[in-house]
Each structure stands twice: as C-alpha cells, then as structure tokens.
Amino acid sequence: MGVLCALPEELRLFRTEVADARVEVHGGVEVILGTLDGIAVALAETGLGKVNAAATATLLCDRYECDRILLSGVVGALDPSRAAATASGAAGRPPGGARARGAR
C-alpha cells in the first residue's frame, strides 16, 4: 500500500510507526519502505499540488506495485492553536493491476 503526504509534518507521523524502515530515492523522491501494522507500505512526501501527488502515486504504483494509495493530510490545519482536521481517501487499482473501470 502506498501512503502519500504533501508535507513533511504529515509524513512524520506515519514514518515513526513503520517497522523495518529503509529508504530508497527515485528521481529526488524519498520513499520509506517497511511495514505498518503488518502491512507492507511505501511512504512518500509529494509536495503541494495535484500534479506532484499524481506523479508520486505513479512512482509508487509502478516501482512498488502498490494496489492501494492512501492520501493523508491535515488540510491546512498546521496552526497549533487549531484542532487538526484530517482528510484521507483511498484509491486503488482493482486486484491484478487491471486498469480502473473506464480508464484508457
């Protein structure tokens, strides 16, 4: 499973929980590999924007065969005086790496 975070503050929470972590770098993108609650994960910081998120998701799917991508973030709630709002969603390819329905 791939986990994408736009900012290092967001990624840090996941990174501290990854067992047997190792790091690989691809095209300047640092990917943390390991397990999280027994599930193999590839974590990466995307930077801001949907183009960066899409490029990093493509890297994780192609290089690490991630069949699910979790997008996690604080949706701009980095001000410590505010409660952190978390938005996450999961998107993935159907089993076997087939394209999503309707994709060309």
Image: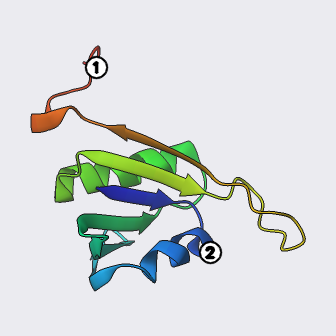
Residue located 37% across and 67% down the image: 43
Residue located 42% across and 79% down the image: 17
Of the image marks 1 and 2, the number of the one nearer the N terminus:
2
Question: Tag on residue 54?
Answer: none
Give the image location of residue 29, x and y in percent: 38, 69
Mark 2, other Cα within 10 Å: few <14 / some 14–19 / many ≥20: few
Give the image location of residue 2, x and y in percent: 33, 57
Residue located 28% across and 65% down the image: 41
Which residue sits furthest front? 37
Nearer-the-camera pick, 38 or 56:
38
Question: Tag on residue 9?
Answer: 2
The residue identified by callout 1 is 103
Q: Secondary structure at mark 2?
A: helix
Residue located 47% across and 73% down the image: 14
Closer to viewer: mark 1 or mark 2: 2
* Color theme of the render: rainbow
Please say if 65 is above or below 38.
above
For the residue marked with disc 1, what is the amino acid? Ala
Q: With 36 as the anchor, is 46 left or right in this view?
A: right
